[in-house]
């Protein structure tokens, strides 16, 4: 069974600094996708970034990058130049399998607070 | 706007009652997922449908049921409601096809309060 672990219940970062949110996963399937979502206080789930298990390079999307260490089974999210609007819950998630994907499972989340 | 529509946005009801939550996926998406998020908790996967058929089942209680209709909209039925069922219920849809990353597109959620 797939499992996602986010060990940081809460994180603080100073505005304009970078922050890393940790995520480790466990799967025996060689094909899987890793995802990060942001949930602001308004409640919606916003997709941030995706990393495929066969991707050779770390994914990047604007100020978001994913530090993918396959051997360690970690997929940490790095947010550069933090902004006040980055304050939110962040969830790491995984789907196993090919394009007929299985369901997506989520970690417990990390609450990020950006300080002015 | 994700393109996934959920109704109602808010619902308050009493213990023992039954409610139905509705979801319309993004145009063209065949898969619908339901998740439950209790206060300050992560998302718990309930159930997945693909083109009208149940594909995967998670931690869904027997008091809960779902279906996906021929027009691909889905309904989640919650019966014999208990206080602990109070939560934010998300619907999500996805493109299930080669070349897509498979991210889920979430609706805004239906917030259920059981009194």
Image (cartoon, helix red, strand yellow):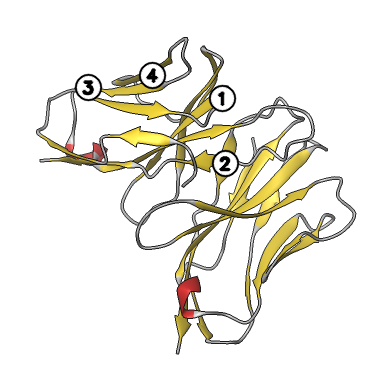
Give above or below for A57 relative to B44.
Answer: below
Is circle 3 on the same chain as circle 2?
no
- The alpha-carbon separation of the residues under discs 3 and 4 comes to 11 Å
Chain where mark 2 sits: A
Whichever of labels 3 and 4 marks the residue nearer the N terminus, that label is 4
Residue denoted by label 1: B31
Are there few (<14), some (14-19), or many (20+) residues within 10 Å of tag 1?
A: many
Picture residue at 83% right of the left edge, 38% below the top: A30
Residue denoted by label 3: B79
- The alpha-carbon separation of the residues under discs 1 and 2 comes to 15 Å
Q: Is residue B26 left or right of residue B115?
A: right
Disc nearest the viewer among 3 and 1: 1
Picture residue at 9% right of the left edge, 33% below the top: B14
User: How many marks are shown on the rendered structure?
Assistant: 4
- The alpha-carbon separation of the residues under discs 3 and 2 comes to 25 Å
Q: Quadrant of residue B9?
A: top left
Whichever of labels 3 and 1 marks the residue nearer the N terminus, that label is 1
User: Which element carries disc 1, helix, strand or loop?
Assistant: strand
User: Which element carries disc 3, helix, strand or loop?
Assistant: loop
Picture residue at 12% right of the left edge, 25% below the top: B16
Q: Is residue B5 left or right of residue A98?
A: left
Contact? badges 1 and 2 (CB < 8 Å) = no
Residue denoted by label 2: A105
Give above or below for B52 relative to B110.
Answer: above
Chain where mark 3 sits: B
Disc nearest the viewer among 1 and 4: 1
Residue A8 location (% of width, % of height): 53, 68
Residue denoted by label 4: B66
Whichever of labels 1 and 4 marks the residue nearer the N terminus, that label is 1
User: Which element carries disc 4, helix, strand or loop?
Assistant: strand
């Amino acid at each position: 069974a797939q499992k996602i672990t986010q060990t940081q219940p809460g994180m603080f970062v100073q505005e304009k600094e970078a922050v890393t949110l940790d995520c480790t996963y466990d799967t025996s399937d060689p094909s899987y996708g890793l995802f990060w979502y942001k949930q602001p206080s308004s409640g919606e789930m916003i997709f941030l970034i995706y990393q495929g298990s066969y991707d050779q390079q770390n994914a990047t999307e604007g100020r978001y990058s994913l530090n993918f260490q396959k051997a360690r089974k970690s997929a940490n999210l790095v947010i550069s130049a933090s902004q006040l609007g980055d304050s939110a819950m962040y969830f790491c998630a995984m789907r196993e399998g090919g394009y007929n994907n299985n369901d997506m499972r989520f970690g417990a989340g990390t609450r990020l607070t950006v300080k002015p | 706007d994700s393109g996934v529509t959920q109704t109602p946005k808010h619902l308050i009801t009493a213990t023992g009652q039954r409610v139905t939550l509705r979801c319309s996926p993004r145009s063209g998406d065949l898969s619908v997922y339901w998740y439950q998020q209790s206060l300050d908790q992560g998302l718990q996967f309930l159930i997945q449908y693909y083109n009208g058929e149940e594909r995967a089942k998670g931690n869904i209680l027997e008091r809960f049921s779902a279906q996906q209709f021929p027009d691909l909209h889905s309904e989640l039925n919650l019966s014999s409601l208990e206080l602990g069922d109070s939560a934010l219920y998300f619907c999500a849809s996805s493109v299930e096809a080669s070349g897509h990353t498979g991210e889920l597109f979430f609706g805004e959620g239906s917030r259920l309060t059981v009194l």
